[in-house]
């Protein structure tokens, strides 16, 4: 069997199992885990949640079943550290979906997962940015890596607020990591990437607008931690992969960072629930979920293309990776303001 056919087969199995599993979860959750709309919700009808559990189960089960076929031993520290941290975060998040748990418990699980990766799989010791040489981080790499892991775990949860957005971003980012892993020769990174693509696409079959089930914290926290960990696992092999990890998720990273800084500057409680993310403001201004999701997925695909062009050494790849995301971020911020202004005009 050719390598490309093997990867496609793994993707197809993951997508099929996830789609069938989420179909069952929809019926189960409709009786036990309904998300009731409130003043902060972007949906108007009670909708089952917790479908992200299938993303967790398919990804972790597929990882442990397929890893030996790629020559990745079950004693691999990277495999073990990611699996234990991801399972802990998913378990606490699942409990939170069933019945809210205190924030300190959730954040404690995120911190514990990040520490597992740092202690057993390593941290960023050097980072390379487009147009700049790699520079050492020294001991600062530990807190920077920790903030990346714990921060993206929470940021992904914040961005799971409209139909198809978090699942679609996972498909795009997973494709990016599948290709990046192939470029730099990291089979574990490619394996996790293809499983994320398949399981997320299977879930997206039920979550594409209008959604029939939501991901829940179990899915969003798991995906945030997973995609953050891939950038950490790839760092020792290629100092460009930490920033490539930002590029494949840059719409989520920018929206979350911009919103937190904006709320902090206004003296608002950045930990309180709100509806002031850029994607939420577009929905409030009248845009449909499908339109906003497609916009963000298009921006994410641009980030993946830039990451591959830069890491792959294409002419002008570094220049484009350095300047296009900031330019698109400015255009997104300006465009949201224009949409809000037009929607407010009688």
Image (cartoon, helix red, strand yellow):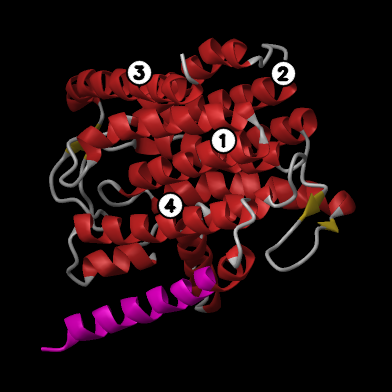
Dot 4 corresponds to which residue?
158
Confirm or deny contact between disc 1 and disc 2 (CB under 8 A). no
Few, some or many residues within 10 Å of mark 3 (<14, 14–19, 20+): some
Considering the whole magenta stretch, tell me its main secondary structure.
helix
Near-viewer residue (292 or 16): 16
Q: Earlier in the sequence, mark 4 or mark 1?
A: 1
The span from disc 4 to disc 2 (Cα, nearest Å) is: 32 Å
Comparing labels 4 and 1, the label whose residue is closer to the camera: 4
Confirm or deny contact between disc 1 and disc 3 (CB under 8 A). no
Is label 4 in a helix, a strand or a loop? helix
State the residue at coordinates (40%, 53%). Answer: 159
Confirm or deny contact between disc 4 and disc 2 (CB under 8 A). no
On screen, 12 above or below 35? above
Near-viewer residue (218 or 21): 21
Dot 3 corresponds to which residue?
13
Instruction: Describe residue 173's horizontal placement relative to residue 105 as left or right.
Output: left
Few, some or many residues within 10 Å of mark 1 (<14, 14–19, 20+): few
State the residue at coordinates (18%, 80%). Answer: 343
State the residue at coordinates (23%, 64%). Answer: 283
* Res 44 seen here: yes
* Res 48 seen here: no
Which residue lies most toward the right here?
Answer: 138
Dot 1 corresponds to which residue?
105
Dot 2 corresponds to which residue?
76
The span from disc 4 to disc 1 (Cα, nearest Å) is: 17 Å
The span from disc 1 to disc 2 (Cα, nearest Å) is: 28 Å
| Magenta residues, start to end | 324-346
């Amino acid at each position: 069997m050719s390598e490309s056919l093997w990867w496609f087969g793994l993707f197809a199995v993951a997508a099929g199992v996830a789609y069938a599993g989420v179909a069952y979860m929809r019926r189960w959750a409709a009786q036990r885990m309904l998300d009731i709309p409130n003043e902060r919700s972007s949906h108007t009808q009670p909708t089952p949640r917790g479908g992200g559990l299938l993303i967790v189960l398919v990804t972790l089960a597929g990882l442990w079943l397929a890893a030996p076929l790629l020559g990745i031993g079950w004693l691999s520290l990277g495999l073990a550290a990611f699996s234990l941290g991801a399972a802990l975060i998913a378990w606490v998040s699942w409990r939170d979906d069933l019945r809210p748990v205190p924030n300190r418990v959730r954040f404690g699980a995120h911190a514990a997962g990040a520490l597992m990766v740092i202690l057993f799989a390593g941290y960023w010791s050097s980072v390379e940015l487009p147009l700049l040489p790699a520079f050492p981080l020294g001991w600062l790499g530990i807190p920077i890596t920790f903030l990346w892991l714990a921060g993206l775990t929470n940021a992904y949860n914040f961005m799971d607020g409209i139909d198809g957005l978090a699942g679609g971003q996972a498909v795009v980012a997973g494709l990016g990591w599948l290709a990046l892993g192939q470029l730099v020769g990291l089979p574990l990174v490619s394996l996790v990437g293809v499983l994320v693509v398949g399981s997320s696409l299977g879930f997206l079959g039920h979550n594409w607008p209008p959604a029939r089930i939501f991901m829940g914290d179990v899915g969003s926290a798991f995906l945030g931690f997973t995609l953050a960990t891939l950038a950490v696992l790839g760092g020792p092999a290629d100092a460009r992969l930490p920033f490539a990890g930002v590029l494949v998720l840059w719409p989520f990273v920018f929206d979350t960072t911009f919103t937190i800084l904006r709320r902090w500057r206004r003296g608002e409680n950045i930990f309180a629930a709100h509806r002031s993310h850029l994607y939420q403001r577009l929905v409030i201004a009248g845009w449909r979920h499908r339109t906003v999701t497609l916009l963000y997925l298009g921006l994410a695909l641009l980030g993946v293309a830039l990451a591959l062009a830069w890491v792959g050494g294409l002419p002008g790849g570094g220049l484009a990776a350095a300047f296009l995301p900031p330019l698109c971020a400015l255009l997104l911020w300006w465009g949201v303001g224009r949409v809000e202004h037009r929607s407010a005009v009688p």
